[in-house]
Image (cartoon, rainbow, N blue to C red):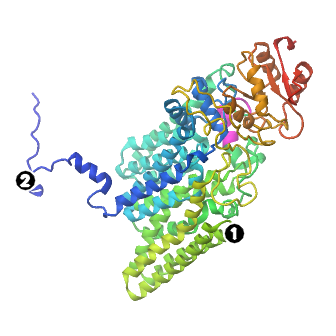
Amino acid sequence: MTTLAPPPAPTAQDGGHRAAPPAAGSRLRRLFTGAPEDPRWARPALWAILVLATALYAWNLSSVTGNTFYDAAVYSGTRSWKAFFFGALDSGSFITVDKPPFALWVMGLSARAFGYGTWQLMLPMVAAGTGSVALLYRMVKRDFGAVAATIAGLALTLTPITVAITRDTNPDPVLVFLMLLGAAALMKAVRTGRLMPLVWSGVAIGFAFNTKMMQAYVVLPVFFLVYLWATRLGLGRRIRNLAVGTVALVVSSAWWMVVVDLVPASSRPYIGGSTDNTVWDLVIGYNGFGRIFGASSSVGSQGNGASFGGEAGLYRLFNSIMGGQISWLIPFALVALIGGLVLRGRAPRTDPKRAALLLWGGWFVLHYLTFALAEGTFHPYYVTAMAPGVAALAGIGGVMLYRAFREGSFARWGWVLPGAIAVSAVWAVVLLQRVSGSGTPYTVAEVVAGVAGAVAVTGLLLGRFTGRQRLTGIAALAAVVALLAGPAAYSASAASSSTNGTNPTAGPSTGGMGGGGMGGQRPSGSGGPSGGTSGATGSGTSGAPSQGQPPTGTGSTGKGSTGTGGTGTQVSSAMVSYLKKNQDGATWLVAVATDQTASSLILESGQPVISMGGWSGSDDAMTLAKLKSLVKSGKLHYIVVSSEGGQSTNSEISTWVKKNGTAVSAYSGLYRLDASDVG
């Protein structure tokens, strides 16, 4: 008979008494004060950063317009579970958006639980943004302490493009949070040698893939490298565990794609952005090689398009469009990465500090090269995915270089930290001079960056030569102020003003297409998340967007217009009222050329609207045979066609509609079709 061994007797080390678990009150106090071994200021500083992040991301939500493209898909998902699962733009499930639906699911569940409106859609984004700051802080603190973690958390919070995109309904905040979850699980697997954290890392990146496809995989090379290099296991077990983690990655990435592609095309929406109506083509084409190689690639040639971030090249992230969004700390991060690796050069293979440096350095470098050299469609807000790497290196490098400055030989290390601060402060002044005259905050930030940078460099050198440690400490604080003054000004601007929903950026407009010149922006009070939808039920089956001031779609032709359908034909609010009055039981209110117009019409009318050509108007979602079938079955009566400039309706469809349909004389380009019109 097996007996249980008695618990071990109390030892001298614990004074003859077993340590009692912390009381509930003690655990609650630690939530606000931190662990006993932490500096007393550390936990209050973390809470202050998280409050700041939440304030920046959630301030004045009434000014948030969101991306009408995704907003409409979320709204449609609250009206139909089929549209919800597939990520369809319209609740009739004619066509999907050109991204996988995980971020839409997150926003959609919030809208179903709390009703459809601005804060309901923004709640998951704000939570993801603030959660990313907390997660980065925790990861950096584990290996480098509270000072490095505080700097890293503050740097991520004040990254201008991160503030701008977190105040939007694009999927990027969810993507970044999932990637950080994957990184945290990976580092736990590296430290412990356990398999399950590695599996969970693969699952997290798989969900990130189902948020924005191939962009989630940018970090994978460094994930593999860090695990293979630094884990405390034999090479055989490392390879075996990595193989299991890769299986988890593939399954969690591919399950939705496989399910969708197995569903017959006639039973699901067309896959927007694809060339053959499959998710696989969307993965390797429009959202894969097309983003990297653009139109010159034989694979995914639909990835070409306007370069909203400027010409591709190593300098791209420093140009007039991108510089103020992300580049403030890049010079310091690069010096910090090189210096940190040199300082840990003789550490054991499994050194956790070097593993962390490799992770964040690889995160930074891989994203930089991907975004700088991408030839396809590139929006400034993509680089928010690079921000955690830059912020982590700023915190880690700041602490490591400061210690080397104080304790290392002056000939070798005395110039590194002052030099990195000087270069970064000068670059901050250059960035702020580019927008001189844009407002007092930028002028003040320029003065602060210049003065604080000079104080920091001078104070460090004087403190080192005189041995006055307090002086070097003050100089280090001045350096933080110098490097974050510019980002703070840009971030405050992003938080206090309405941004372009389709192409959000922070700070002053810098010209070109990076200033948010494209459409998708909706004014406050419009039908949709910013409008009178707060009365929507939790299920989202009632409370359609209001008929108030219409949203402004891409290519808007004037006040009171919902857009042009990419065809040059004005689609007015009066037309929407006419269409609803004469819908006659049809599933879809109207068919238009592009997603931009369709999304605005969906949000204003609350009815399904067909986008025949997807985002760019070039998708083959609508064929003449399909149009005839929809008309004959009474599911569609109206279509907007035009051949006047822009992205016109398919010529075959346009010719047939004009020949067989009845023109609505009050609205140019609008035709009525009934079953009797189909031969």
- Return the x and y of residue 304 as percentages of the image width and height: 76, 46
Q: Which amino acid does label 1 sit on?
A: Gly
Q: Mark 2 points at which residue?
A: 16
Q: In this view, does 294 lie above or below 464?
A: above
Percent across and percent down for residue 120 are 53, 38
Residue at image coords 62%, 22%: 263
* Residue at the (21%, 49%) spot, across then down: 22
Please say if 122 is above or below 491: above
Q: What element carries label 1?
A: loop
Instruction: Inspect the magenta stretch and tell me whether residue 280 lies in it.
Output: yes
Task: Tell which tag, 1 or 2, sits nearer the viewer.
Answer: 1
Instruction: Name the residue nearer the viewer: 513 or 120.
Output: 120
Given residues 457 and 16, the one toward you in this image is 457
Q: How far apart are marks 1 and 2 (CA)?
A: 71 Å
Residue 437 has which mark?
1
Asked if residue 348 shows in the view, the reply is no
User: Residue 198: x, y in percent?
Assistant: 42, 44
The structure residue drawn at horizontal position 10% and vertical position 45%, both measured from the top left corner, is 8
Is there any visible trace of residue 378 in the rendered image?
Answer: yes
